[in-house]
Image: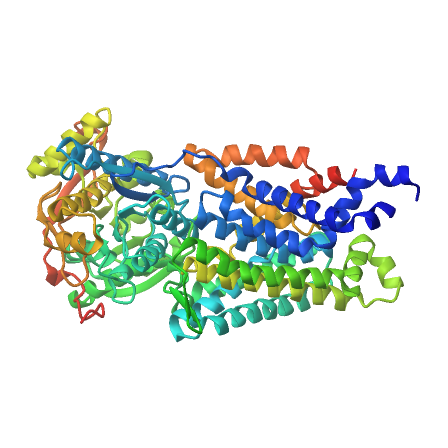
Amino acid sequence: MSTIATDEHAPTLKFESVERHRVLATILALAVFPLLMPFHALATNILLFGLFAAGYNLTFGYTGKLSFGHAAFYGTGAYACGILISQYGVHWSLAIAAGVTLGGLTAFVMGLLAIRTRGIYFAMVTLALAQCVYFIGFHATSLTGGDNGLRGVNVPAISIGPISIDLLQPFTRYYFMLTFVAFAVWLLSRILNSPFGAVLEAIRENEQRARASGFNIERAKLLSFVLSGLFCGLAGALTAINLSTVGIDIISYHTSGQVMMVTLLGGMGTFFGPFVGAGTFLAMEHVVTAFTERWQLIVGLMFMGLVLFFPKGIWGTILEWVKK
Amino acid sequence: MAADKDHPASFQRRSIIKAMATGGVVLAGGGVFPGILRAQADNIRVGLPIPLTGPFVNEARAVQRGAELAVKEFNAAGGMAGRMAELLVRDDKLNPQEAVTRTIELIEKDRAHFIVGSVSSAVQLSVNNATKQRKVIYNSVSQSDTINEAKDWSKYTFHECLNPHMTAGAVARYAFPKFGKRVVFLTADYAYGHEMVRGFQTVGKAMGIEVLADIRHPLGQTDFSSYFPKILALKPDVLVVCNFGRDQAISFRQAADFGLKKQMKIIAPLLIHSGRMVDGHDVYADIIGGTGYYWGLEDTVPSAKRFNDAFRAANGGTYPTDYAGLGYVGVRGVLAAAKAANSTDSDKVSDALRAIKGDFYKGPTYYRACDHQSVQSMLIVESKPAAQAKNKEDIFNILAIENFDESKLRSCKELGHA
């Protein structure tokens, strides 16, 4: 490569080096985020919804499967963690682990039933199965609280050795959640960088060709779905602790639709996009609501504008500009 | 790749910092609007999370107008030793998670001293969980039996609204002796519906009613015609319709079309003011139900007359609805208690609220000591035809007023209080 060519491509090279350290860059961006954000409770919501969307992105953005049932993994994660803490007094760490496990397990069962379908059929089957989970949650009143929701997921303080962390403090709560999100982001990057991650992208680009190359497509898709479920389960479990309550709406199809919108808005198949999407969407909604009761109209128009002018999502389009 | 090798470290450091800053700014994009939603520093701040969007927007607006009047009156009377009250209204979108986020922000960011509000059972329980943890007083203005139970309740929890046990009980005591004891329930399948049915059955059991069926319908049902042949075949004396909002209006309208009103008496735990205003007399004709407040009370209750006049003066001549009354007294109560305690400290105001026995808008009310349920009167009403109405807001005839005493509430022991 000549010197002139190198100069022309200098921004690309710079960005490549950032991309190589995407985990660090993402964690640092998330760490400075609440300092720029005047609403701290909202910042924590954005962080956790961003994690949910990042988990969803593994199925939607990287494997190319449009799922309409991810609320089920988010919801079961939240309920498993919430029920164990509020009704059985289980330690928060075990409750989070249970939430992650149940999210993955739900994904495994739904995946077995849905993974062989494609396109719109996959979306419909996942939606139907998630609705089944919703109605189980709605009617299992003694466990979930049903329509009244689950209350009392109270983890006011956490003791680690001699240190006690007060989770009712907004900043403390955010950074406590961030430690889990940081670990998840690192793990997600490792998965995407592995040969398995390459297989997922191969499936997204051309499933027939990936199959012809000798990969077990069904198994890879199922594994990606389950891994996605684990991340969404973690996001759900942390949300339960963050808000101290779990409402049945968490499993509704609105949530499944919202996570898809957020991922699209941020940039599907980009590493940091889901967090950008969650930040933009939730903050937009939050701020517009303060000015007008017609917030849905304004947010809808802004959303349309973003989709029209940022077809690859906000982060996806920014990446494209930087790489030009 | 030569350049990369020349200055790898500096490139990486700079670009990582740049990416980090970009990421943070993009993420915060919609959020950095200094100045908005900022509360005054020394005021008494009352947070009001209500569903300004969603199906209960009429009720939410009414709550807001009532609350605004309470704040206005408090400030006009000099506030608390010169400290003025301020209302911070937030949209909870009828979603428990949204409501909790709003409440937490009202407490943490806006430093709200008190929280009043909610027009949903699920939302109020979530809000209560958040306020309880942060030791902030919460006065709920929406129906729920659960919030008074020991598991959810705290010293800082107050329930201004009637609860399903009181509402259904009062209607049952009025209706079953008059109209008969063979009963069918048509119930919306969620907490509100279930709690109302339980209220009717508890009182009805002592009166010897016979429940022929409890038919459950999903929330947001648009067609009830498939339920009516079964109800007609059961030939009940009374059909109890335990649903709310649009479900109520549609089921009433279709019940008339299918001739149910000719064969049986239809009763409902609550007839909502805004619903009757929108849907008109024909839909509500001959149906009997309860309400916590109706402006027509002014003929017999002086405090209602005073409240109506003040509300009309502030709202272009419109009479207050049931939920306007709740918003008014919900906020007025906590402000009166703060004034009495001369403090915004949660413990002191909680004690002061328990001690208040007042007549703010519908006759005497007070909070029961063990669970902070507002003990208050309950009205039994039926729709008034337009020909008899004094004005277009004259929509109900008051058939009876049940003055409550604690014996008609679920006992403290039953609720799990020591």
Residue B339 vs residue B274, the one in the foreground? B339
Q: Residue B303 occupies which quadrant of the picture?
A: top left
Q: List x then y, in percent, for residue B172.
A: 19, 57
Q: What residue occupies the far right of the structure in this picture?
A: A2
Vertical placement of residue B112 versus A147, above or below: above
Horizontal arrangement in the rendering, residue B254 relative to residue B30 (left or right)? left
Reply above or below: B203 against A25.
below
Image x and y of residue B389, in percent: 18, 30
Left of A273 or right of it: where is B301?
A: left
Q: Who's the residue at 52% across and 61% down the image?
A: A236
Look at the image and tell me whether residue B395 can be seen.
no
Q: Is residue B306 visible?
A: yes
Q: Nearer the viewer, residue B212 or B363?
A: B363
Query: In this figure, what is the number of numbered marks?
Result: 0
Q: Residue at x 78, y 50 (%)?
A: B8
Coloring scheme of the render?
Answer: rainbow
Quadrant of residue A306 within the rendered picture = top right
Is B370 or A271 nearer to us in this picture? A271
Where on the picture, by quarter, is residue A321? top right
Name the foreground residue: B105 vs B237. B105
Q: What is the residue that sits farthest to the top in this orientation?
A: B316
Q: Position of residue B341 (x, y in %)?
A: 13, 49
Report x, y in % for residue A166: 39, 62
Q: Residue at the spot x=68%, y=57% of the render?
A: A58
The quarter of the picture where the C terminus of chain B appears is bottom left
- Seen in the picture, residue B108 relative to A96 is either above or below; the reply is above
